[in-house]
Image (cartoon, helix red, strand yellow):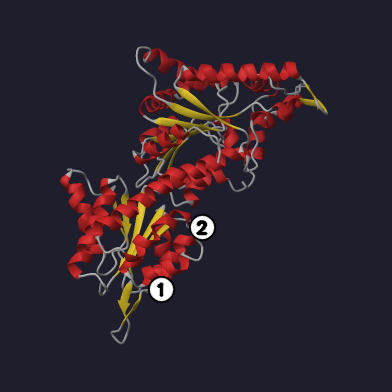
Amino acid sequence: MLNINAKFEESIVKELKNNNLAIFAGAGLSRSSGYVDWAELLSGIASDLGLTIDEKTDLVSLAQYYCNDYGRQGINEAIIDKFGKEAGENKNLNILAKLPISVYWTTNYDSLIEDTLSANKKNVDKKINQNQLKNYTPNRDVILYKMHGDKADPDDAVITRDDYESYNKKRPLFITNLKGQLIEKTFLFIGFSFEDPNLEQILSRIRVDLITASPKIHYCFFKKINKEKYLISEGKYDKDKYNEDKIKQELRVKDLRRYGIHTIFVEEYDDITRILERIYLKYKLCNIFVSGSAEEYGTFEKSDAEEFMHKLSKRLIQKEYNIISGFGLGVGSFIINGVLDEVYSKGNYIDDRLIMRPFPQKSSGGKILKDLWTDYRKEMISLAGISIFIFGNKKDSNGDIIDANGMIEEFNIAKEQNTFIIPIATTGYSSKAIMDEIKNDLDKYWYLRDSINILENEKNSEKIIDEVIKIINKIRNEL
């Protein structure tokens, strides 16, 4: 497990639950998909000027020098050429796109963010120039602010010193919007070097405006200075250069704190992916899928079974979890009742706490009902980090009670999607069959090892539910 600040992860999950997390993406986020950073974009431009680019090169001035001598067209062609290529898969963006993040900012010209969001069924409202700020895309899921323009209109891309100096006049509303959101939301900066003059100016203005108050906390990723990078020959390092760069990074980190930006160090860039994966998993643990159907309740009295299901969903809501249900026969109504009992007693709204997905019972439009149910189940379970299985029976065509094959399919989908599975086998039927399989692989289902006896045999509702909560706490504490 990575030695990462647990407080950071919990803070991000909290902001996700409150729909208050925003992403600011720099060129580093797009590099893993095959796109270039600014230095690579302008390498040909530098060559035309008889220059080479190093870490001290002022890239904004370089672009301006080229424009002074040769005009804008060469820069435009470089943008079209470098960012018109097909992008490779981006693991970090794929994770972010699955999370409830409604605001993205970027200085990138490529279309990677909007393409990835669209592929994840997010409706994107893209803002490239400030005239578009007044427009509203119906049913939008995400607003994407491309504050430096887009590859489709390179003439309007912000890249030269002239572009930066005229930014306040041409795009003042971008600055106003970003200032407001940096005060209101928590930002996670990814792939960003913090050398952009626009952002530095905006951060400075916010700091001056809020000089008497604590700044809003934001986060960024930095790759820790690695001594191996300064290896000259076997066992010999450029100590002076290593120490200088290390001091520079430490000073940069301290300076960002003035703006409320806290640094999360990683050893390798792949560590960012692992951190995001863990955040995604922790967020999904807030959503619990309850799978169940029942024509009868086996060894449970009907009233006891109804009370158990009502109390189960009520306690989960009390513990700040959200419930996802397919409204199974003989189960769904009591799960809903428990949620409503708790939510309405607190005067809260139901929308964010309960996701109901009743299954269609008749096919239409040429769709095969069985295939439709499978796709439906996959989408529903993908929202959850934990799946609880109760009862699981139905009547066959002869009127006999049999195990519910739909629950078994949901179990298999939950396994494929790596959700944590809790079968309450004491309710019998498919839930017991699931537990019988799980007991053969307790290394994988480690979190159930100490709870199997209660899950298989206990009939007291309170004791069963207490054990379920204990299992969930164990899972959360181990992540």
Q: Which residue is mark 2?
A: 444
The percent position of residue 180, horizontal first and vertical second, equals 37, 25
- Packing grade of label 1 (10 A; few <14, some 14-19, many >=20) is few
Q: Secondary structure at mark 2?
A: loop
| Among the two numbered marks 1 and 2 on one chain, the one whose residue lies closer to the N terminus | 1
Quarter where residue 8 is shown: top left
| Mark 1 secondary-structure assignment | helix
Residue found at x 47% / y 51%: 120
10 Å crowding of disc 2: few (<14), some (14-19), many (20+):
few
**Residues under labels 1 and 2: Cα distance?**
30 Å
Query: Is there any visible trace of residue 166 in the rendered image?
Result: no
Outermost residue toward the bottom in this view: 398
Residue toward you, 362 or 474: 474
Towards the viewer: 42 or 237: 237
Residue in view at x 48 percent, y 29 percent? 219
Closest to the observer, 267 or 464: 464
Decide if residue 399 is in sight here: yes
- Residue 445 relative to residue 110: left or right: left
Query: Residue 370 got which mark?
Result: 1
Asked whether disc 1 touches disc 2, contact meaning CB atoms under 8 Å apart, the reply is: no
**Quarter of the image with the N terminus in it:** top right
Q: Position of residue 65 (x, y in %)?
A: 68, 19
Quadrant housing residue 477: top left
Residue kind at label 1, given as amino acid type? Lys
Q: Residue at x 33, y 56 (%)?
A: 324
Which of pointers 1 and 2 indicates the residue nearer the eye? Answer: 2
